[in-house]
Amino acid sequence: MTTTGRPRASTTALSVTRPATQHRRRTLLIIGLATAIGVAIAVLPGHRGWFDIGVYHGAVRHWADGGQLYEWVTWNQYGFTYPPFAALVMLPVAALPWHPAIAANLALTVVAASFLLHLLVGPVARRAGWPRWHTFALAACLFAALNPVRDTVSFGQVNLLLMALVYVDLWLLERRHRLAGVGIGLAAAIKLTPAVFVAYLLVTRRWRAAATATLTTAVATLLAAVVAPNATRTYFTEALWDTGRVGKLEYVSNQSLLGLVARLDPAHPDRLLWLCLVAAALAFWWYQVRRAAGDERLGFAFTGVLGVLVSPVSWVHHLVWLVPGLIVLVGATLPWPSTRSVERWRLRAGVVGYAVLSSGVVWIFANGSSGPHGFLGGNAYLLVAVAMLLLPISGDAGRRTPDGMSVQSG
């Protein structure tokens, strides 16, 4: 009796100890990774000095004090480039002193990033059976290491806030909520680029959500026109069409299709070539979105990639819109280890894409991108975006449980 009882006690102790040991190892791994990434961000070059929030803060305060919104410029001639509704939204932050304004921007960015990671990574962790908080912490570390995320934070940009607004609509669409479309509409009223998601709603026949988004944008824009008629007139007749306000198209940070074309011939960019590339991107996007029928997460991911490609200007910090595509790609490779070669190939592609987007490689070619190596290096992030748009991922590939069965989103 005694001898048979001892092994049982030992087995019970082991069953209790192993989870505790695994928990400790995972925690130490995350602490080590977070420390390494934090030190790297602090030490390596690439800090932007809160330049963009400086533009928002300066221009909106100048406007609130009675000046013209689109006349205010920085020492190097950069000015406010968003619609007047964005200035209305930014008034509370602009009213703060400089350092509290930076702190407010950081706090809002952290909230937006947390929401996005919870929304996008949570279902992947559940399907894979991964520990929830360890997965979230690991994803946050990997997210922070991405060059577009680092630039968004150090510029004081609003990209992640706009993404959060758009992805609120993903959450609402998955629940068939009648308010779906409001987030996209608000984001498009603040900055025009998210309007590409209205096209997604139309292609996928989400008529009510598309109408809601369009109406929301219209109401927000009209509100700004009533409050600031002069700024609204200036924006839609002058500032919107002045590409010089945002910088040089050929600059290596512009990882859009037009940026690629401009780098081929900075003096005379071939607009016809650009339009052909945009048409091709739209065709591939339409095919992928229709093929993804019913999978909102995959459709939103493809649409974010399209927005980066077809926008005339997509600075590196705008490429945070590629992150959902990377997460969907990971979800499409589950379960691990995969027995299918196509899923192993997708996983490798995702790892390579992540490594490139974290590397900062495009900045090596900031002073010139001639020759084959310059073309590849100077357009590296753009090429990742193109590859993401072309990847063959089926509509339910990102929604499988570990046993291979598909599940409903939300």
Image (spheres, rainbow, N blue to C red):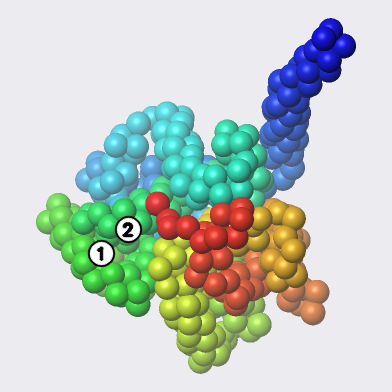
Count every numbered label the image shows and give the total. Answer: 2
Q: Nearer the viewer, residue 73 or 298?
A: 298
Image quarter (top left, top right, bottom left or bottom right) of the N terminus: top right
Residue at the outermost right position: 3
Q: Earlier in the sequence, mark 1 or mark 2?
A: 2
Q: Is residue 316 above or below residue 257?
A: above
Q: Please tell me the numbered disc located at residue 173.
A: 2
Q: Residue at x 50, y 70 (%)?
A: 395
Amino acid bearing label 1: Ala
Percent across and percent down for residue 328 are: 56, 59
Secondary structure beneath dot 2 equals: helix
The image quadrant of residue 214 is bottom left
Amino acid bearing label 2: Leu
Q: Mark 2 Cα within 10 Å, few/some/many (few <14, many 20+)?
A: some
Percent across and percent down for residue 315 are: 55, 62
Which residue is the site of mark 1? Answer: 209
Q: Tell me whether circle 1 and circle 2 mark residues in contact (CB < 8 Å).
A: yes
Q: Is residue 78 above or below residue 313?
A: above
Percent across and percent down for residue 255 are: 59, 68
